[in-house]
Every structure is written in structure tokens, then in C-alpha cells.
């Protein structure tokens, strides 16, 4: 039976990881505004979008394909040709975009400090180690096999992409000296915590698989209820209290505070609902959708208040 167009479109956007690309761009814009930097050019956001989709799709395109009960895996089997074509086109776009950026800024890159190079390299290296090394000489190793560490690795890589990179690459592109700030550090920690919590919530979906594989995620180690009430919700409350304290010290407008509270409140509400089993699309649309909610609330707060 053929699915309605809107259902097919939703699956395309979320199963194809294009929504992750949109979230990466939206969070990057939010972070630039919050650090009082102008927005980057279209080339930068194009590279961010395409690289994010490429990265997330790699895990599925390289898996051994066999029809399963997993809707997402079956979608990749059904649309294998499109996915391969998309990966090729996205790779070309990222390569061309990176080439243009390097050609335009090679003089500035020569004079970067070692701290700036460290910031440029640490996040993609961490992201690469998440998938790991698969070599006869070096052996097999990846960070995603460390269940408790996995959410922090993903959160760290995302926080770097959407918090550090926007201002660092703007500085390079405009010949400015990049100087890390306390505001930037606070926003990095905020994004790191927020996305790490989302990852812990997402592990709930894979509880049965991770348990059978003996992958010691938080939910496998301590159980569903304790993960929600002793880990996820306390982290959300700590993040919320920290933000309110910071906002009051900085004398933020009431509406700016209220708008930035919305993502934390939504995070707690979704965490509360996690004791009920949900579909894969619920996790992709609602849980990952909280990244877009956060970006929109933060952007509106900065633009209007």
C-alpha cells in the first residue's frame, strides 16, 4: 500500500538525516547571535548542513542490509540508490565548499594559533573516533561501544560544531583574531549538556538491543525509571537553574529568560513521557526536534529581546 505524500516526506526528512542538518544550521545561527557575532555566509551553512547529513547517514549506508523490524533500516534498503546518490552529491558539495574556503583563507590559516588549530581538529577527530578504527594493523576500536561514554562523545562533537565553529570560522573568514570567551564557554557547556541528555533519552529506544549486546548504556546499567528520574531530569534541572542564575547576573530581559526556559521545560516534559514505549519517528521528531525548538527560542530571544 502506497503511503500518503506527507508520510513519505516525513520519513524522507527524518530517516534521511536531513533534519539533523537543519538542526545543526539552526543551532549554529543561535550560537552566533548569543555570542554577538554576525552570521556566517551561505557557504558555511551549506557545508555544515551537508557534512552533518553525510556523517549521520554513514552509519546506515555501511551497515549490512537485511530486512528487519527496524523501520529506519528498511527505509535505507528501499531507497538505497537515492541514499548513495545523495551521499555522493553531498560529498562533492562539502569538498567544493571546503576548497573554496581554504583557497579564500589560506593566508589567515597559516597564522592561526595552535589553540585555534586544536579547536578546529578536536571535534572532527572525536566524531571520527565515534565510528572508530577498523584496521588489520591497528585493530578495531570505536567510542560508541562504550555505552556510558557515547552520549558525552556525541554531545561534545555537536557542541563544538554549533558553538565553537560558527565564531571561529567567522573570525578566520574576516581576518579577525579568535579569542575564546566565558560566554562562549558557558554556551558550549549548555549545548553539550542539552544534546548529551537528548542522546541518553535516545538510548532508551535501543534498550533491548543494547541489553542483548551487553552495551552498558545508562538505561541498561540503572534501568529506565532511574535513568529518567535520577539522571535525565536532575541534569535538566541543573541546566535550568544554571541558566536562570546566569541570566539574572547578566540582567536579561524577562522575555529572553522565558523563551530560553521553554527548551528545558520541554526536555523535562518529554523525559517524563519516556516510560511509555514510542515509535522510531517519535524519537526522531519529538526528541531530536527539541534541538530545533532550542535554536528557534534562542534566536527569537536574541533578535527581539
Image (spheres, grey):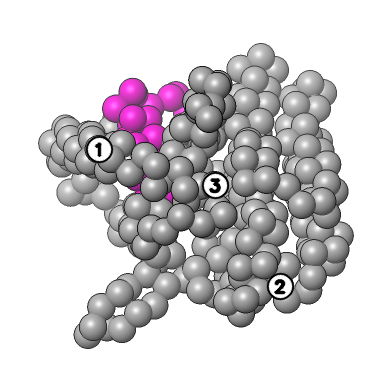
User: x and y percent of residue 82 in the render?
Assistant: 31, 36
Q: Which residues are magenta?
A: 34-56
Residue 32 vs residue 209, the one in the foreground: 209
Q: Quick one: SS at disc 3?
A: helix
Closer to viewer: mark 2 or mark 1:
1
Q: Which residue lies under the disc numbered 2? A: 220
Disc 1/disc 3 C-alpha distance (Å): 21 Å
Locate residue 248 relative to residue 32 in the image: left or right.
Answer: right
Dots 2 and 3: beta carbons under 8 Å? Answer: no
Q: Which residue lies under the disc numbered 1? A: 85
User: Which quadrant of the view contains residue 204?
Assistant: bottom right
User: Which quadrant of the view contains residue 104?
Assistant: top left
Q: Quick one: SS at disc 1?
A: helix
Q: Which residue lies under the disc numbered 3? A: 71
Disc 2/disc 3 C-alpha distance (Å): 23 Å
Which residue is found at the position 73% from the left and 32% from the top? 260
Locate residue 275 relative to residue 142 in the image: left or right.
Answer: right
User: x and y percent of residue 199 in the render?
Assistant: 62, 55
Badge 1 crowding class, 10 Å Cα cut-off, few under 14, some 14 to 19, many 20 or more, is few
Question: Is the residue 127 above or below the residue 170 in the image?
Answer: below
Q: Quick one: SS at disc 2?
A: helix
Residue 67 vs residue 179, the one in the foreground: 67
The answer to whether one can see residue 78 in this image is yes
* Among numbered discs 2 and 1, the one appearing first in the sequence: 1
Residue 171 vs residue 77, the one in the foreground: 77
Amino acid at each position: 500500500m502506497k503511503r500518503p505524500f506527507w508520510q513519505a516526506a516525513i520519513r524522507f526528512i527524518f530517516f534521511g538525516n536531513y533534519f539533523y542538518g537543519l538542526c545543526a544550521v539552526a543551532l549554529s545561527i543561535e550560537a552566533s547571535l548569543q555570542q554577538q557575532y554576525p552570521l556566517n555566509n551561505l557557504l558555511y551553512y551549506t557545508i555544515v548542513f551537508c557534512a552533518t547529513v553525510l556523517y549521520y547517514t554513514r552509519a546506515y549506508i555501511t551497515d549490512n542490509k537485511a530486512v528487519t523490524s527496524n523501520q529506519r533500516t528498511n527505509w535505507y534498503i528501499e531507497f538505497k540508490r537515492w541514499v548513495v546518490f545523495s551521499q555522493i552529491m553531498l560529498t562533492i558539495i562539502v569538498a567544493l565548499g571546503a576548497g573554496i574556503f581554504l583557497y579564500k583563507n589560506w593566508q589567515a590559516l597559516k597564522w592561526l594559533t595552535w589553540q585555534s588549530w586544536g579547536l578546529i581538529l578536536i571535534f572532527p577527530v572525536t566524531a571520527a573516533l565515534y565510528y572508530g578504527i577498523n584496521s588489520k594493523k591497528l585493530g578495531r576500536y570505536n567510542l560508541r561501544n562504550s555505552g556510558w561514554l557515547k552520549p558525552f562523545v556525541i554531545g561534545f562533537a555537536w557542541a563544538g560544531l554549533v558553538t565553537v565553529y560558527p565564531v571561529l570560522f567567522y573570525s578566520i573568514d574576516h581576518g579577525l583574531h579568535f579569542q575564546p570567551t566565558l560566554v562562549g564557554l558557558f554556551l558550549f557547556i549548555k549545548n553539550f549538556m542539552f544534546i548529551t541528555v537528548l542522546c541518553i533519552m535516545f538510548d532508551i529506544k535501543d534498550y533491548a538491543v543494547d541489553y542483548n549486546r551487553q552495551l552498558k548504556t545508562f538505561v541498561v546499567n540503572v534501568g529506565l525509571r532511574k535513568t529518567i528520574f535520577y539522571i535525565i531530569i536532575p541534569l535538566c534541572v541543573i541546566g535550568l537553574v544554571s541558566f536562570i542564575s546566569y541570566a539574572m547576573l547578566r540582567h536579561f530581559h524577562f522575555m529572553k529568560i522565558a523563551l530560553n526556559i521553554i527548551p528545558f521545560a520541554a526536555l523535562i516534559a518529554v523525559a517524563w513521557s519516556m516510560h511509555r514505549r514510542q515509535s522510531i519517528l517519535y524519537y526522531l521528531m519529538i526528541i531530536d526536534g527539541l534541538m530545533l525548538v532550542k535554536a528557534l527560542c534562542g534566536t527569537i530571544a536574541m533578535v527581539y529581546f
